Image: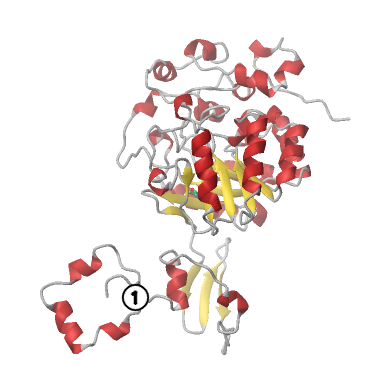
């Protein structure tokens, strides 16, 4: 016998029959999106009311389930701040961008972002169950007129078929789990027909906004497409309800490994003690904290931004202090398309040719004696070294360490340094050339 769901409901939903409340289609079709609707649940602040009256506001929609998690007495409620717009959303800030991660520039076909060597981000819809105010993709998300069509989808599949280095496809959007079940199943079927795609991942906030969508039927369907991984998006312990716990349990039982990606948000979760409780609660429902993101430089998110140091302070307070499984990687997604960059406290304090000095989470400082003699494995006979596959230009520092390249030059480096005659003189003396194997373009 499944335990009955003890649901927290805002008073206006007290009389909604359970079959309706627990039906995700009912939740979707009863979302709140106007000041008038929302006022039935919460007393709006001036700032919220002003924002909700704006014409060009990024889309607002909140499921009855999610709005019920808000304490209506608290204007600073952490769930409320994620979902109800405030007038600060309209404020511009230095370095603000529409597409801060330059995703559009990395899209060989619409909706497919191929940024990394072996994996792609596939945007399958622009629709979500509710809309996070700090959305990194607010430039496209929420707008039903911008959603991807059949032709885009066919082009995405074609690109994947002819790009064998892609072994990992990350479905996102929008939220893939708001797609009609048949469409989602077709999409997964088509991806699974491509032999080089080894794993499929879904990034979804549906379990948080609308846990009733995670039915046994959906889990059975997803389980046909293993290996399939899923990341949810929880930012605050108040979002971990009985319903979310049960939804996660159903997915875990269907063999789907669960992770969590959260965003560091001022006034929502910028507290090391809160974060410790969050990550510990997540591991209790078998969700492994994966990434904690620094807030992107995206329009509308200015008032949510914290200094990067806040993230470092949080990791300082987690690593060593709690289970390693509970510690996410703190990530700055580099503006301009630089991609995800991990940032963390320093544990390495100094080093010499035979010793390193490191410190632990308690401030205990110790040494690690390096081996006096180290015989490295032989890359010439190592079958993994022989089989390595990499796209030229994407090996990064690994390529430097491997000896494939000797340097990486910033754009314009040669032009700048090719001042009158220098290049010539060096070439004549033949002193410069033999040094560099180089990146191969100019010398
Ligand atoms: C985040 C992201 C991925 C996945 O990155 P992982 O670090 O492997 O989780 C892939 N492509 C794009 C464009 C991304 O933004």
203 with respect to 284 (left or right): left
Please state the horizontal and vertical placement of residue 171, each as a whole percent of the image: 57, 43
Q: Is residue 276 left or right of residue 332?
A: right
Rendered view: 389 above or below 220 = below
The answer to whether residue 313 is seen in the rendering is no
Residue pictured at 67% horizontal, 31% vertical: 181
Closer to us: 134 or 46: 134
| Residue 272, picture quadrant | top right
Crowding at dot 1, Cα within 10 Å, few <14 / some 14-19 / many 20+, comes out as some
Comparing 353 with 137, the one in front is 137
Is the distance from the Cβ of mark 1 to the nearest ligand 1 atom less than 8 Å? Answer: no
- Regarding residue 170, the answer to whether it shows in the image is yes
Residue 68 is drawn in which quadrant? top right
Q: Position of residue 108 (x, y in %)?
A: 43, 48
- In terms of image quadrants, where is residue 414? bottom left
Q: Quadrant of the C terminus?
A: bottom left
Q: Nearer the viewer, residue 206 or 67?
A: 206
> Which residue is found at the position 76% from the left and 17% from the top?
19
Which residue is painted at 45% across and 38% down in the image?
136
Residue 309 locus on image (x, y percent): 44, 50
Looking at this view, name the residue that lies furthest to the right: 1
What residue is shown with label 1?
Answer: 438
């Amino acid at each position: 016998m499944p335990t009955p769901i003890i649901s927290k409901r805002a008073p206006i939903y007290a009389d909604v029959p359970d079959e309706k409340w627990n039906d995700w289609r009912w939740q979707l079709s009863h979302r709140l999106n106007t000041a008038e609707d929302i006022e039935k649940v919460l007393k709006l602040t001036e700032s919220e009311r002003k924002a909700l009256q704006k014409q060009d506001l990024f889309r607002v929609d909140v499921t009855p389930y999610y709005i019920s998690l808000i304490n209506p007495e608290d204007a600073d409620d952490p769930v409320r701040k994620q979902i109800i717009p405030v007038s600060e959303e309209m404020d511009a800030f230095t370095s603000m961008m529409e597409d801060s991660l330059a995703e559009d520039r990395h899209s060989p076909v619409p909706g497919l972002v191929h940024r990394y060597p072996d994996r792609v981000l596939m945007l399958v819809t622009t629709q979500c169950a509710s809309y996070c105010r700090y959305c990194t993709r607010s430039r496209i998300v929420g707008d039903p007129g911008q959603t991807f069509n059949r032709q885009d989808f066919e082009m995405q599949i074609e690109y994947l078929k002819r790009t064998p280095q892609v072994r990992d496809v990350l479905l996102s959007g929008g939220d893939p789990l708001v797609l009609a079940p048949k469409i989602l199943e077709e999409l997964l079927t088509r991806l699974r027909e491509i032999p080089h795609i080894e794993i499929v991942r879904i990034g979804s906030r549906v379990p948080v906004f609308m846990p009733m969508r995670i039915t046994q039927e959906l889990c059975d369907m997803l389980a046909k497409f293993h290996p399939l991984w899923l990341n949810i998006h929880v930012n605050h312990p108040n979002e971990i309800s009985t319903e979310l716990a049960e939804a996660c349990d159903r997915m875990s039982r269907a063999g789907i490994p669960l992770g969590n990606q959260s965003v560091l948000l001022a006034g929502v979760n910028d507290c090391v003690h809160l974060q410790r409780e969050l990550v510990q609660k997540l591991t209790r429902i078998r969700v492994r904290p994966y990434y904690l993101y620094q807030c992107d430089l995206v329009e509308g998110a200015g008032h949510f931004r914290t200094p990067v140091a806040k993230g470092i302070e949080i990791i300082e307070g987690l690593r060593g202090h709690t289970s390693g499984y509970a510690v996410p990687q703190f990530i700055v997604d580099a503006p301009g398309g630089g991609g995800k960059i991990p940032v963390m406290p320093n544990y390495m304090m100094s080093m010499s040719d035979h010793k390193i000095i490191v410190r632990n989470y308690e401030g205990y400082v110790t040494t690690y004696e390096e081996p006096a003699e180290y015989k490295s494995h032989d890359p010439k006979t190592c079958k993994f070294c022989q089989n390595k596959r990499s796209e030229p230009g994407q090996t990064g520092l690994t390529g430097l360490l491997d000896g494939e390249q000797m340097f990486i030059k910033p754009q314009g480096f040669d032009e700048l340094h090719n001042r009158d005659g220098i290049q010539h003189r060096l070439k004549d003396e033949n002193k410069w050339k033999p040094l560099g194997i180089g990146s191969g373009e100019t010398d």
